[in-house]
Image (cartoon, helix red, strand yellow):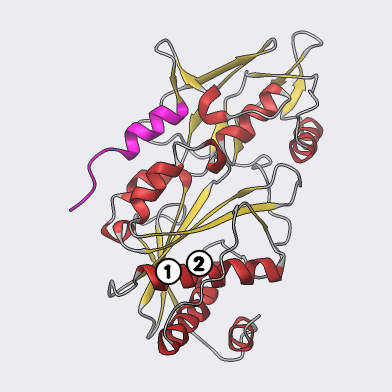
Amino acid sequence: MNDSITSNMQGSKGRTVRLFLAEGLPQGIVIADVGNWNGKALAAPRGRLPDLLRRAEASRTGVYILLGPDPDQIDGVLAYIGEADDIAARMRIHLRSESKDFFDRVVFLVSSDEMLTKGHVRYLESRLIKLTQEAGSVALTNDTHPDFQRLPEADRADMDTFVENAALVLPVLGCDLFRRRQGPQAAQQGGRVPSAEVGSPVFTFATGGASATGQETDEGFVVLAGSTARRAASGTFPAGYAALRDKLVASGQLAAGFTPEVWVFGADVMFTSPSAAASIVSGRSASGPIEWKIQPQGLSYRDWRASRIDEPTQS
């Protein structure tokens, strides 16, 4: 890891990180910056993504990070790091891709003075991927690991400083790529379940004798009380989700159902993504954006979310 970045991450000197709650709520869009930094970071849960993409900063050249639970490890985190000339346009493509379904939180890194070029963000992407790999804190889903160095020496120095500042604000935004997380939860175990997102319909999912309903919230996807889940698990049921299901049973949130073949949800339970919810309901690996649907028209969660993302952006 770059020595200067390591020094700053270890807190060798005091720094001020400023947070702005764009919607007045900590679970909404949060904007972070550091004094004398020409960059800014914007973060939001997946449920707030339509509003985040309507912001002018989202259409800038920059780097984006997708974060979500690792289904193969109960305390694991998956991440994808990418770059784009127009982050909002790239995100609209990702939302139609099953391979990017895992994320429940997004972070954008952009320049406050709009001076980042394609070369700059390719270098930033390369540095962030390398630092994340070296830390071993999360499992990266990137297919390629670029090593982009084709920048003038002065520009590389500027971008290394950009990374140093990003390394300060990312953990504050719940994006701790450079040191190991301590036990994040794959689903909220009890406690308050947030109210449904304004305008969120009720989705249904039926499979193998189980039938469930759910709604999108600002913090995740909630399976509603009274829904059922299959007891029998298939060979494709991820180990992390199996462990999560065991915790839900132990806590009483999943209880004996009306028949020996199903569990019943005794309370509303929040999951970090539609796929996590669908996998627990079905006892197998499931693509939530495709399998959760609005009845009677049969509109999938993916198509409903895409229709909201495609609404006109702010000028």
* Residue to which mark 1 is pinned: 121
Q: Position of residue 50 (x, y in %)?
A: 35, 44
The disc at residue 87 is none
Determine contact: label 1, label 2, CB under 8 Å: yes
Count every numbered label the image shows and give the total.
Answer: 2
**Separation of marks 1 and 2 at Cα, in angstroms:** 6 Å
Q: Position of residue 256 (x, y in %)?
A: 79, 18
Task: Say which quarter of the image contains residue 260.
Answer: top right
* Residue to which mark 2 is pinned: 125
Instruction: Say what amino acid the circle numbered 1 marks.
Output: Val
Which residue of the protein is positioned furthest toward the left in this rendering?
315
Whether 118 is drawn above or below 310: the answer is: below
Residue lying at 67% horizontally and 66% vertically, measured from the top left = 133
First to last magenta residue range:
301-315
Which quarter of the figure is the N terminus placed in?
Answer: bottom right
Residue lying at 76% horizontally and 47% vertically, measured from the top left = 73
The one of 18 and 37 positioned closer to us in this rendering: 37
